[in-house]
């Protein structure tokens, strides 16, 4: 018995020791918070350890320390005024020290940031739109989001259809990268929006040079990069839900995100639903201008070893978009009247979600498989395959109950292969090279019963590039070279009767070169110069278009004699800040384009069995574009900031000594942002006002268009955002109002300005919950 008691006492003592040891909470988490751009310490940053409700503020030297932490897994939330929130997963098994790098951005108007990455490895001008701005504008499409950047405008076909215009370039001249893959669709159409859901992105970036030579595409202008956030390595399930409602169009949308890091395959899923009805101008409804979307994206990642990693990305984008009923006219006299009417034909004083012809249905699917092999920290290989399927159907108002049969039905399939290698030569030279191949198969569906607008074709494109980047003290030098070989087999239908198939075999060679330098004169002042030579092949639609493009309510005629475009573009930029209060950026650019291809109005209205429509033809000229982008922000305090931006652009047809058409009007934007003091319940509460002024496009002749150029206009907007934290859950509330004064106006780059005003007042309210 005594022996038994002794054993019980020993076991009890051991268990008590284990329990005491398990509950030992004397570990310390310490570290330093630094600026991502300057490496300087950030004082007064809030460092909060979720789950245990412990938090501290970093000292003047950026250091912090949280004591008496139990062993376990935690989430660390670091915030600071003027910085993007930084959330990290930390495992505490002993005293732990970390280094927190904060993206201490320079806010240049409504979430547009000049700086975001330490030691930006390019001499080309670039701007970013951050995750917070994307999420707080969940109702916007990609093009409207990009419009917040200096030098970026939108070419619209009503309220729901838009494509970006950067420094006067759009469509085939801009490359849009969806997670590193050049978007392959029918981007030639002025009424064809990019088939990308911006809510998949953590960052959207615009490079304003002649394009990044690393990427394959037909870019003669800028490059837009839409980049999803990497999957968090956190083993816990995390996610977010973003819901919004909008008054104009009685629209609503929902975006959901879930992600989880595991020891096997890390995964992330993102889905979006949107639905809108008829938009409204200041005075009347725009009938049949609703739209709806259903999008989904999946990311997978597997870490096989310290050297080998594989990623899979799959996305599907599906939309249905209405086109203003009053833009399709039955005869010439009615068309002439429609161009001068205050209110378009077929306008009804009632709202509807119903979508009827004319309308568009678009489906875009992307699959990307990437393998990354790391030799060491300075050398690695990447191997990529991507496949894309793009289906586009456009429905016209047809006789005999045939409006349900598309008048245009295009199917495009694209396959892409790439191998890249990057390494360092010495300590300061980065060397990157790669080879790429793209195969495209574009076909028309015979179900339409209409001669196709563009022909069937096959395209093979082989490209290679070399990039060199060198740093020397305050200098950075950059040099790039790219060569593309393109072969096209085209099966066109003759323009004359009897109709027959005419085969064309096209061969193109393209050489692109870019060079630049960047110099840091002072710690917070940089200037950069870049020059790029680029060429672009005439696109299939520019060569062979023949018929009605119902989405823009015009007849388009191609020209098989078009030649290759050749361009030289120079940019000079200056950016910096004074005493962390006054931030500024300036970009001056000039671009000369030999044999510039453009769609020119023909001063002709043609009557067809499908109605009366204006005629446009593709022509060539020598062109010049000159522009200036200005942006500045002044911080009167940590709470109050005032910003301004101005964009100037002038395009000239040098061959005929007349202005170029479809150039954005000069515009300016003033912003006022005030951050309220944080209370016990809500934090990061801010309010803001925006004043947008657009000048009349006076650099245009009256004979160059079918209708007079719209007058100048001004718009007033407001915004609000706040957040509340509930332990591991965060609630974000945001609201904004556009065209507060309900101004009736028309924009020069909106193709439906011929028939109707632009949208009137709209208020958006959104709620986002993350966990």
Image (cartoon, rainbow, N blue to C red):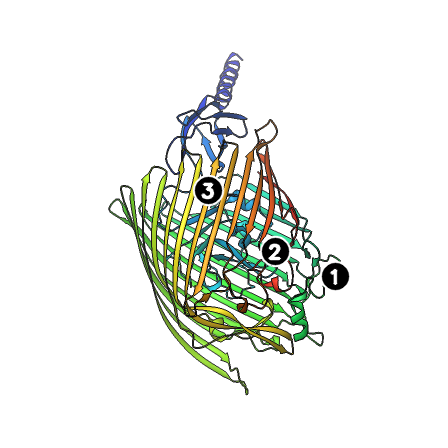
Would residue 120 appear left or right of 425 to someone viewing this image? right
- Do labels 1 and 3 touch, CB within 8 Å? no
Give how far apart the Cα atoms at labels 1 and 2 are: 28 Å
Residue 758 coordinates in the image, percent (x, y) = 63, 56
Mark closer to the chain start, 1 or 3? 1
Q: Identify the residue at the far top of this view.
A: 2
Residue 66 coordinates in the image, percent (x, y) = 46, 24
State the SS at label 2: strand
Residue 520 coordinates in the image, percent (x, y) = 32, 42
Q: Is residue 87 visible?
A: no
User: Between 210 and 682, which is closer to the camera in this rendering?
Assistant: 210
State the SS at label 3: strand
Is the C terminus in the top left, top right, bottom left or bottom right quadrant? Answer: top right
Residue beneath disc 2: 294
Residue beneath disc 3: 632
Name the image quarter holding residue 116: top left
Give how far apart the Cα atoms at labels 3 and 2 are: 38 Å
Mark closer to the chain start, 1 or 2? 2
User: Between 687 and 26, which is closer to the camera in this rendering?
Assistant: 687
Residue beneath disc 1: 348
Give how far apart the Cα atoms at labels 1 and 3 are: 44 Å
């Amino acid at each position: 018995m005594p022996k038994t008691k002794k054993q019980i006492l020993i076991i009890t003592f051991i268990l008590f020791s284990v329990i005491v040891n398990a509950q030992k909470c004397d570990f310390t988490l310490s570290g330093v918070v630094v600026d991502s751009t300057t490496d300087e310490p950030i004082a007064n940053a809030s460092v909060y350890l979720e789950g245990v409700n412990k938090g501290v503020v970093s000292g003047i030297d950026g250091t912090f320390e949280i004591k008496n932490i139990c062993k376990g897994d935690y989430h660390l939330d670091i915030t600071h005024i003027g910085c993007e929130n930084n959330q990290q997963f930390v495992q505490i098994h002993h005293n732990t020290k970390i280094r927190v790098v904060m993206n201490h951005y320079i806010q240049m108007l409504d979430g547009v940031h000049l700086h975001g990455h330490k030691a930006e490895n390019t001499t080309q001008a670039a701007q970013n739109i951050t995750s917070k701005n994307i999420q707080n504008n969940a109702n916007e499409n990609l093009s409207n989001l990009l419009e917040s950047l200096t030098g970026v405008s939108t070419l619209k076909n009503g309220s729901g259809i838009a494509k970006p215009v950067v420094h006067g370039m759009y469509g085939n001249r801009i490359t849009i990268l969806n997670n590193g893959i050049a978007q392959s669709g029918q981007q030639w159409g002025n009424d064809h929006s990019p088939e990308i859901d911006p809510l998949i992105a953590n960052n959207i970036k615009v490079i304003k040079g002649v394009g990044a030579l690393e990427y394959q595409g037909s870019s003669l202008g800028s490059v837009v990069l839409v980049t999803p956030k990497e999957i968090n390595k956190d083993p816990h399930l995390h996610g977010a839900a973003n819901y919004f409602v909008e008054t104009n169009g009685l629209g609503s949308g929902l975006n959901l995100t879930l992600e989880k890091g595991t020891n096997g395959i890390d995964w992330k899923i993102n889905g979006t639903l949107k639905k809108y009805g008829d938009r409204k101008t200041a005075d009347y409804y725009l009938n049949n201008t609703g739209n709806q979307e259903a999008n989904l994206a999946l990311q997978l990642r597997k870490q096989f070893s310290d050297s080998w990693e594989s990623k899979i990305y799959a996305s599907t984008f599906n939309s249905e978009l209405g086109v203003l009923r009053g833009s399709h006219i039955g005869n010439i006299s009615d068309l002439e009247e429609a161009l001068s009417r205050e209110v378009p034909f077929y306008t009804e004083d009632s709202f509807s979600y119903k979508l009827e012809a004319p309308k568009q249905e678009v489906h875009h699917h992307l699959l990307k498989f990437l393998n990354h092999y790391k030799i060491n920290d300075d050398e690695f290989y990447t191997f990529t395959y991507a496949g894309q399927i793009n289906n586009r159907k456009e429905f016209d108002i047809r006789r005999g109950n045939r409006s349900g049969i598309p008048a245009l039905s295009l199917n495009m399939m694209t396959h892409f292969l790439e191998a890249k290698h990057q390494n360092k030569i010495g300590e300061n030279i980065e060397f990157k090279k790669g080879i790429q191949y793209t195969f495209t198969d574009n076909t028309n569906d015979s179900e339409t019963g209409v001669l196709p607008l563009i022909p069937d074709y096959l395209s093979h494109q082989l490209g290679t590039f070399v990039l060199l980047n060198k740093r020397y003290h305050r200098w950075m030098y950059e040099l790039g070279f790219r060569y593309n070989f393109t072969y096209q087999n085209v099966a066109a239908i003759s323009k004359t009767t009897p109709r027959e198939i005419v085969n064309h075999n096209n061969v193109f060679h393209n050489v692109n070169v870019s060079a630049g330098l960047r110099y840091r004169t002072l710690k917070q002042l940089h200037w950069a110069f870049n020059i790029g030579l680029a060429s672009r092949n005439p696109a299939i639609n520019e060569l062979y278009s023949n018929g009605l493009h119902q989405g823009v309510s015009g007849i388009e005629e191609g020209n098989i004699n078009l030649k290759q475009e050749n361009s030289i573009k120079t940019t000079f930029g200056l950016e910096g800040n004074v005493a962390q209060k006054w931030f500024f950026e300036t970009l001056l650019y000039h671009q000369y384009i030999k044999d510039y291809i453009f769609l020119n109005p023909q001063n002709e209205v043609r009557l067809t069995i499908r109605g009366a429509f204006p005629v446009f033809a593709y022509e060539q000229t020598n062109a010049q574009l000159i522009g200036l982008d200005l942006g500045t922000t002044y911080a009167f305090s940590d709470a109050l900031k005032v910003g301004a931006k101005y964009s100037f652009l002038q395009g000239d047809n040098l061959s005929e000594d007349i202005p170029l058409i479809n150039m954005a009007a000069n515009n300016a934007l003033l912003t006022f942002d005030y951050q309220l003091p944080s209370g016990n319940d809500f934090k990061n509460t801010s309010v803001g006002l925006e004043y947008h002024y657009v000048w009349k496009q006076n650099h245009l002749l009256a004979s160059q268009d079918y209708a007079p150029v719209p007058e100048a206009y001004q718009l007033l907007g407001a915004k609000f955002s706040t957040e509340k934290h509930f332990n591991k859950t965060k609630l974000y509330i945001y609201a904004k109002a556009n065209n507060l004064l309900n101004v009736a106006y028309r924009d020069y780059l909106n193709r439906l300005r011929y028939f109707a005003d632009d949208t009137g007042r709209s208020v958006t309210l959104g709620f986002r919950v993350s966990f």
